[in-house]
């Protein structure tokens, strides 16, 4: 069963059936025991009545009781009978209600012991029989006389009561079960409605009718809808970056291509300025490289846990030490063990690699790369310092522009800082700050994961 509502209803129905079934069986048994106790109490009352009304000194057992106060024992066919049996002689006294009715043989009963049984008369009638044995001393007899007193009641009354109770019990339980299932179904429909609403909004997003989930949902679903919106926002931004990168790339290479076309379309090809052509080719190369790097940025992985930043950064620093070994630079690295980066490993390498490589190019003797856990695990803070000549205050904003370079003699394309700024601020929503003095430059990246 694929329906969550159906599963819950089926489970609730099974639990309800088991619970009400067990409760019904227990109530039925309790009622039968109570009804049986009532039968025994009535029969005991009749036995005590026989003891009080009988003359056990009479010579003729058939006449030991003249009349009884219970009219049921004086009415033939009433279903209530009584019998007194002299154990020694076997003579028997029968109530008038037993006329025309053959009672089953009297069961043996010990003195002073109650014996309740369910017996069946030769006619097939089911009866409850309660026997009680007494010993009577009197009438000048040397030995006491033993009597067995018996009271009978038609079992049909008991069965009728039990049948009516069962019919009423299971009828009420059936109605109660149906009512509970209806209430359960209504409650489930109302309780699970937010899930259906989320599904409707997701389908609307798939059909392009809306861009994100806008409804207000219970606390149990708010985390899900919030993460879905973040995922949708992340995917839209990623797609937009691709589109913007391609658009920027197409726009950026129009001018250098037009210059190249005009240079090589001159009437006299020998007069083409090859220096201009070379400059424009370099410009195209830098532009393509920049936009490909920006479009390839993966961004923060919303569904993946943050990974330790130390191993990646230590590998990068080890590589830079080899690259700049001839310059004898002191490249130091300090990484907080608690620092995590919740994004693509390639992005982390791009950020740290560009900043550290740029610092090594301009450093005189020392570069320091530090990563700290800024706010109890909620932020990633990267600091790269060098002891180079620094950047003039008026050039800080300029150097962050794509393709901007302060010294053409230093190898590079002038896009590293622009790539880092784009990635940190637009992709990860962080901050990129560049500070510089005559004693060196500090690049600081701060990204919050909250």
Image (cartoon, grey):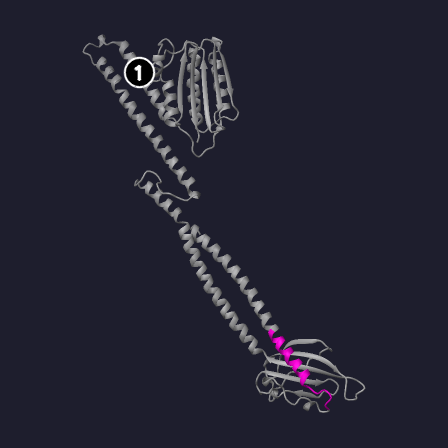
Q: Quadrant of residue 293?
A: top left
398 lies left or right of 162 = left
Viewer-side residue, 450 vs 8: 450
Q: Position of residue 62 (x, y in %)?
A: 68, 90
The chief SS type of the magenta part is helix
Identify the residue shown where x is 53% and y is 64%: 24
Q: Position of residue 182 (x, y in %)?
A: 42, 58
What residue lies at 45% left-to-right and 29% top-to-bottom? Answer: 342
Picture quadrant of residue 216: top left
Residue at image location 43% in from the left, 50% down from the top: 4
In the displayed structure image, the side of residue 164 where residue 358 appears, left or right: left
Horizontal side of residue 421 vs 51, given as left or right = left
Label 1's element? helix
Residue 277 in the image: state x and y as whole percent: 27, 12
The image shows residue 213, relative to residue 52, as above or below, that is above
Q: Which residue matches tag 1?
A: 283
When the figure is inspected, residue 74 is found, relative to residue 240, above or below; the finding is: below
Task: State the extent of the magenta-drawn residues as a range.
Answer: 38-58
């Amino acid at each position: 069963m694929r329906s969550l509502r159906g599963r819950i209803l089926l489970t609730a129905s099974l639990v309800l059936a088991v619970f009400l079934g067990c409760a019904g069986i227990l109530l039925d048994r309790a009622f039968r025991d109570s009804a049986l106790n009532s039968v025994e109490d009535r029969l005991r009352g009749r036995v005590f009545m026989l003891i009080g009304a009988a003359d056990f000194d009479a010579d003729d057992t058939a006449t030991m009781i003249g009349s009884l106060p219970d009219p049921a024992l004086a009415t033939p066919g009433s279903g209530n009978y009584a019998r007194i049996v002299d154990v020694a002689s076997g003579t028997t006294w029968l109530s008038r209600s037993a006329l025309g009715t053959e009672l089953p043989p009297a069961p043996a009963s010990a003195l002073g012991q109650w014996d309740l049984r369910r017996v069946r008369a030769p006619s097939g009638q089911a009866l409850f029989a309660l026997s009680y044995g007494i010993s009577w001393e009197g009438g000048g007899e040397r030995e006491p006389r033993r009597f067995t007193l018996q009271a009978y009641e038609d079992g049909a009354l008991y069965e009728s009561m039990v049948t009516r109770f069962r019919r009423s019990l299971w009828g009420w339980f059936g109605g109660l079960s149906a009512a509970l299932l209806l209430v359960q179904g209504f409650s489930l429909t109302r309780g699970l409605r937010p899930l259906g609403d989320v599904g409707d909004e997701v389908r609307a997003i798939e059909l392009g009718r809306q861009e994100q989930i806008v409804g207000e949902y219970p606390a149990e679903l708010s985390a899900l809808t919030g993460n879905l919106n973040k995922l949708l926002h992340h995917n839209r931004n990623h797609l937009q970056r691709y589109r913007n990168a391609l658009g920027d790339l197409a726009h950026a290479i129009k001018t250098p291509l037009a210059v190249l076309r005009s240079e090589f379309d001159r009437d006299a090809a020998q007069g083409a300025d090859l220096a201009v052509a070379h400059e424009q080719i370099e410009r195209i190369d830098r532009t393509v490289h920049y936009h490909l790097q920006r479009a390839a940025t993966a961004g923060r992985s919303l569904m993946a846990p943050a990974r330790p930043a130390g191993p990646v950064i230590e590998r990068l620093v080890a590589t830079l030490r080899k690259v700049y070994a001839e310059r004898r630079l002191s490249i130091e690295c300090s990484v907080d063990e608690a620092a995590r980066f919740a994004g693509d490993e390639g992005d982390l390498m791009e950020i740290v690699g560009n900043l550290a490589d740029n610092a090594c190019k301009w450093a005189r003797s020392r570069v320091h790369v530090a990563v700290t856990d800024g706010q109890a695990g909620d932020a990633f803070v990267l600091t790269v310092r060098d002891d180079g000549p620094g950047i003039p205050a008026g050039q800080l904003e300029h150097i962050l522009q794509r393709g901007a370079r302060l010294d053409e003699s230093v190898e590079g394309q002038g896009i590293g800082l622009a790539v880092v700024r784009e990635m940190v601020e637009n992709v990860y929503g962080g901050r990129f700050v560049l500070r510089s003095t005559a004693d060196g430059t500090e690049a600081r990246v701060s990204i919050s994961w909250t």
